[in-house]
């Protein structure tokens, strides 16, 4: 089983976050976290190895961005929805018009980004904006930090091969237990 080194690596610049179809502009970093919270149900019968069951699953997406009119507008719209306890639809995806030089046709303008509908979607779901910070240090770029917390299940829709454009090497089969 061989790897093609650089060809198989998913580059961070390929992955963008969309909120209700709008890209979160000028991202410097995006993170998606999935967590499974378990409860131990071990008894004397289990011996040395504890037994657990799934109690809940949570997920969140964080974004770090340079502050711009576009990024502030997108995040403030999400903040207004969160104040009304109305979820946003978040997509973590590779835009269909992305290539090695960035977003094709943008020349720095977010108006040419695809809205996530034609993208290779990694994950999507409903979420609430649960944290938003604006940092404006003197003599430096202003930045935004946002955290979106999932309000229900998320959907995984793309394989690594779909995102990178290269077929991943087969690995072990994993079947979730219920």
Image (cartoon, helix red, strand yellow):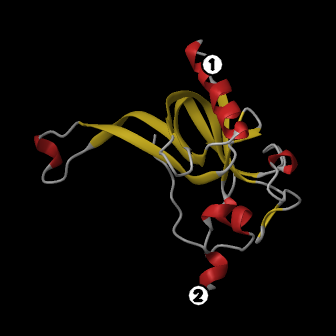
Q: Which of 46 and 131 is in front in this view?
A: 131
Label 2: which secondary element: loop
Q: Name the residue under label 1.
A: 80
Q: In the image as oriented, which residue stretches furthest toward the front?
A: 139
Rendered residue at 62%/68% (across/down): 10
| Percent of width and height locating residue 4 | 63, 85
Mark 2 or 1, closer to the camera: 1
Instruction: Point out the tag, 2 or 1, that comes first from the N-terminus.
Output: 2
| Percent of width and height locating residue 60 | 50, 39
- Circle number at residue 2: 2
**Is 32 positioned to the left or the right of 81 in the image?**
left
Residue 99 location, quadrant? bottom right
Label 1: which secondary element: helix
Q: In this view, does 7 lie above or below 94?
A: below
Rendered residue at 28%/41% (across/down): 52
Q: Is residue 75 above or below residue 79?
A: below
| Percent of width and height locating residue 80 | 63, 18
Q: In the image as oriented, which residue stretches furthest toward the top?
A: 84
Q: Nearer the viewer, residue 135 or 130?
A: 135
């Amino acid at each position: 089983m061989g790897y093609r080194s650089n060809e198989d690596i998913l580059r961070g610049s390929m992955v963008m976050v969309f909120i209700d179809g709008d890209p979160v502009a000028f991202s410097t970093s995006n993170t998606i976290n999935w967590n499974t919270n378990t409860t131990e149900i071990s008894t004397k019968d289990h011996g040395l190895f504890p037994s657990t069951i799934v109690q809940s699953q949570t997920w969140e997406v964080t974004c770090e961005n340079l502050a711009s009119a576009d990024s502030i507008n997108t995040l403030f719209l999400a903040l207004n929805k969160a104040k009304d306890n109305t979820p946003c639809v978040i997509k973590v995806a590779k835009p269909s018009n992305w290539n090695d030089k960035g977003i094709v046709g943008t020349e720095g303008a977010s108006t040419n980004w695809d809205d996530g509908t034609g993208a290779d979607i990694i994950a999507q779901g409903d979420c609430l904006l649960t944290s938003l910070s604006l940092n404006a240090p003197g003599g430096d770029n202003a930045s935004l930090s946002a955290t979106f917390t999932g309000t229900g299940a998320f959907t995984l829709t793309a394989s690594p091969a779909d995102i990178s454009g290269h077929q991943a090497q087969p690995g072990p089969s994993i079947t979730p237990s219920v």
